[in-house]
Image (cartoon, coloured by chain):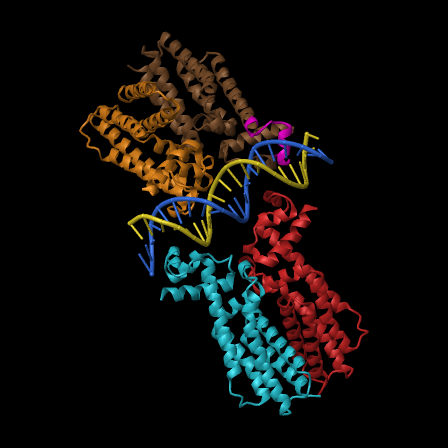
Chain colours: A orange, B brown, C cyan, D red, E blue, F yellow
DNA sequence: GATGAATGAGCGTTCATTCAT
DNA sequence: CATGAATGAACGCTCATTCAT
């Protein structure tokens, strides 16, 4: 289905080269149609972009939602570690989507600037909640030292932020995993020791 | 001096709207000259961009260099904390430069893609070195627990990476400082406890 | 019947916005079909236009023909006045058709330029004939002063031309009727006095 | 000067083929430049059109103004007749301008529809005034029969309206002049006889 | 009959760049 | 140094038209 292919190619190219750096003609060419064919499915370049953006947000929210819903049969440590791993898996499963989302978050196209914050807010909240839950539980069952939850959450979020940058910065998976493990190890040390 | 103003405005606009999203005419207009005047100083748009980029790299390197050279009269904890604070100060002193650098690093313009890694390498190395020095010293004088240096360094770098993203993501300085302090506190806990 | 609705909407839109200013998609949308459906009935945009044009000409000719055929039981004055009134009625009954016709006459679409004169010729002749008949009769029965017929006809035609412009220029019917009456009164004065 | 040539060619082509029927590329080609050169002088197609329109209005107003100012040394009859002749001269001197103006008046481009009435209002008023003056004077000095001024003015305006249509409809000057003379003769008959 | 998909041609517009002044 | 004029290339978009279904 052309419409879908267009959206996917668009997401990849917009993620790689930005909104202004991507010509509709490129998108069309990769899909194997001529440029005006795009207008049979999308009202404008902006519409195509926004459709891709909405999908990316939905995918991201769905992923975060899954994270929240996951059965908590694991130990606190494993449960937190699992968040990082799942995030990494998510990046690997659809790196284009994530590159597109990260770009939209940090350097939104001009027409997106006003909507962007709200768009990411929901995901942000859900992720924060998921982490908080695990941490509160960890404190309760004694696997984490009793510290202000905010501190534990903030620094874990910082962990994920740093990793998301590094994922796109470092091309080697090996290196990335080393960073992930090292960073988590340190976090865990700080979190459970006195 | 027109030449300088051009470079500065270019850096800001390239940082805000990207290479493709910034027209030479905008840059010229902000400086108060007509577009062709740019060509009296720069051979092309790419040249203007690269000049700005080189300056950003130099400034960043200089900053990192300063960090390395700083007299180590402080305790290890204060010394590491100071890195974060200095980084934050640097962001605040020239946010445009940093936005421009971050954008160039994560989403380089097409013609930069091949040079980009090398460009950031030096700074990266220097920063790593600066951190490493402090950490090794910290281990030696017993203020840090004896752990693989790589782990301590990786996770500290992850700290700075996360913070740099958050600086541009969160607009409130207060919130940012809370995140910084919380994240550092946790890091330090993990680093010096057993 | 779709075919007919298409022609009617086309006539209105071509009259309002001209040939180039009217997209087939607009016509289709107003009729409630998709653009390609037009091609089931008309070979091309030009064909649709020409069909509408032919109909307009036929309607105009029919109207003029009726005028000619009208039983001459009225006085000369009433008979001439009646022409103006009938014309006005015709405008009111199908203003779209008349707007379309006037536009085609004064500013024909490029492909019509060569046919246009001939198309209006017949109507012109018939109208001239109708007027002439009444005037000749008026002279014969003494209700009009004996003057060159050409002069009486030319100036009456000028009357109708001026009124047709004014009908589309002035939006108020009241104002238009005042102009009509005043202009006719003066004409009649000139025509029957010495 | 390119800017001026552009405006003149634009006025002619817009008058001949309408706003939508005229491509900027045609205008540019006739002037001997490439299309984008237009944008060095005019902000958009609409701007070019409006500039031409404003000039046409000014020329028309100037012409009407001259008419008003003309010394009234002539007899009433000659004075009124002169208006028609001057109008004809004006058409002949710049037929493109007049065709453009007439088209704009009767079939304004969509973006002009709201401004158009006001734009022609001033000229309209001035012309009406010029005619009124002559007619009032004619009544006062007895060369015109004492009749409602409105009637005399309305019907004279109808005369000019009809003639302006006929000027563009009939291509032959001879025919046009015959119509003009005949129509005026009748008008005058009606105006001065009882 | 009618539609969805697709296209070729063309349009208005922007932009980096050149060049004479 | 700086500008006005101009251009080639490209872009987003519209539209009449075709064709398989």
Spot the residue most to the left. Answer: A73
Q: Magenta segment range? A: B31-47
Q: Is residue B189 magenta?
A: no
Q: Is residue A91 above or below residue D29?
A: above
Spot the residue most to the bottom. Answer: C141
Question: In the image, is D60 to the left or to the right of A181?
Answer: right
- Quarter of the picture containing the N terminus of chain B is top right
* Image quadrant assignment for residue B124: top left
Question: In the image, is A50 to the left or to the right of B13?
Answer: left
Tag count? 0
Q: Residue at x 59, y 72 (%)?
A: C166
* Image quadrant assignment for residue D83: bottom right
Can residue D134 be seen here? yes
Q: Residue at x 64, y 32 (%)?
A: B37
Q: Nearer the viewer, residue A143 or D135?
A: D135
Q: Position of residue C174 (x, y in %)?
A: 55, 77
Q: Position of residue A87 (x, y in %)?
A: 30, 29
Q: Is residue B37 magenta?
A: yes
Question: In the image, is C102 to the left or to the right of D80?
Answer: left
Can residue C103 be seen here? no
Q: Is residue C1 above or below residue C89?
A: above
Spot the residue most to the top. Answer: B140
Q: Nearer the viewer, residue C7 or D7?
A: C7
Q: Position of residue C172 (x, y in %)?
A: 55, 73
Q: Position of residue A52 (x, y in %)?
A: 36, 40
Q: Nearer the viewer, residue B182 or D46?
A: D46
Q: Residue at x 62, y 69 (%)?
A: D165
Q: Is residue C62 above or below residue D146?
A: above
Question: In the image, is C126 to the left or to the right of D185?
Answer: left
- Quarter of the picture containing the C terminus of chain B is top left
């Amino acid at each position: 289905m052309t419409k879908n292919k267009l959206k996917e190619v668009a997401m990849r190219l917009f993620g790689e080269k930005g909104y202004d750096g991507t010509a509709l003609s490129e998108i069309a060419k990769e899909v194997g149609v001529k440029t005006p064919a795009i207008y049979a499915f999308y009202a404008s370049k902006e519409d195509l972009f926004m459709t891709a953006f909405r999908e990316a947000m939905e995918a991201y929210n769905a992923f975060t939602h899954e994270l929240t819903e996951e059965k908590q049969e694991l130990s606190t440590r494993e449960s937190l570690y699992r968040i990082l791993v799942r995030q990494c898996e998510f990046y690997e499963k659809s790196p284009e989507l994530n590159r597109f989302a990260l770009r939209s978050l940090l350097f939104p196209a001009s027409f997106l600037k006003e909507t962007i914050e709200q768009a990411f807010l929901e995901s942000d909240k859900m992720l924060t909640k998921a982490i908080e839950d695990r941490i509160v539980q960890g404190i309760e069952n004694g696997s984490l030292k009793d510290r202000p939850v905010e501190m534990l959450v903030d620094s874990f979020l910082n962990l994920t932020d740093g990793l998301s940058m590094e994922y796109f910065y470092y091309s080697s998976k090996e290196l990335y995993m080393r960073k992930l493990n090292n960073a988590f190890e340190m976090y865990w040390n700080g979190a459970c020791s006195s």
